[in-house]
Amino acid sequence: MSSVDQDTVARVHHAFIRPMLDTGRMPTRAAVASETGTSLEVLDDALAALAGIHGVVLDPHDGEPWVMHPFSAAPTATWVEHGDQGWWAPCPWCAFGIAGLKNGHATIHTRLGGEREPVVVHVQDGRVLEDDLVVHFAVPPRDAWNNVHRFCASVLLFRNRNAVSAWCVRHGIAEGGTMPVQQAWELGRDWYARHADPDWRKWSAVQAAGIFNHVGLTTPFWHIPAADQPF
């Protein structure tokens, strides 16, 4: 963690998240520095602090935000629509988070199992219309930050649990945690509920575990060890 204080980190986080939510476009570091009256040096310190608590993934070449969950600044296989707005999401969990930030209304475009068949999921009035689908997590969330891109890439929608099992055998991937799509929506909604707040703080491990428990994810796959660091 750099020497910048938590209020500055939260202010910088909000300065990127709010325009992304409003426009679908990630602002540049230079634009945020100008908008907030912050020097680029202090801004980069805040971004480094955010990266240290997994609040942003920075492009290793130019230091610009690459992923600031639930948004991706680069194209992904998951597209979220709300009216004439749209965003790339790293995974369905994030896509449902965006839907939550847009008051429970969005259309999500992706592919079943990340393969050939496209699927469209509609969230309306806080409910998923295609409620017979399931979402599979191949990697336990406690291991997400070992390789967050692999984690996000393996959170996928499927027709049913049998399709998950067949997919895991086909690709040689251990079967992880599978939930009804409505439960995945509730997870995304609750997880990202405060993400656009000006005073945002990263969830602690205890708070993260509480969210999982609240939406009914109580098996060992979803266990998060208690820790002092943000999750």
Image (spheres, rainbow, N blue to C red):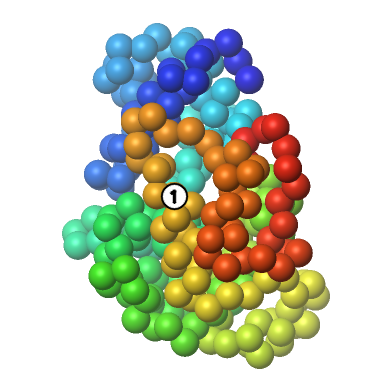
Q: Locate residue 192, reporting x and y percent.
A: 44, 50
Q: Which residue corresponds to the image point at 37% horizontal and 68% vertical from the top-left?
A: 108
Q: Residue at x 38, y 24 (%)?
A: 11
* Quarter residue 40 falls in: top left
Q: Residue at x 79, y 72 (%)?
A: 174
45 vs 64, nearest the viewer: 45
From the top left corner, tell me how far across and down residue 9 is, in percent.
Answer: 47, 23
Q: Along the line of sight, which residue is nearer the eye, 212 or 132?
A: 212
Q: Is residue 111 visible?
A: no
Q: Give the quarter of the figure containing the N terminus.
A: top right
User: Is 177 left or right of 87, judged from the image as shown?
Assistant: right
Q: Position of residue 24 (x, y in %)?
A: 30, 47
The residue that disc 1 covers is 192
Q: Is residue 97 left or right of residue 23?
A: right
Where is residue 43? Give x, y as percent.
45, 17
Query: Tag 1, which secondary structure?
Result: loop
- Amino acid type shown at disc 1: Tyr
Q: Is residue 67 above or below residue 13?
A: below
Q: State the residue in front, 200 or 65.
A: 200
Q: Residues within 10 Å of mark 1 (few under 14, many from 20)?
A: many
The vertical placement of 20 against 42, above or below, is below
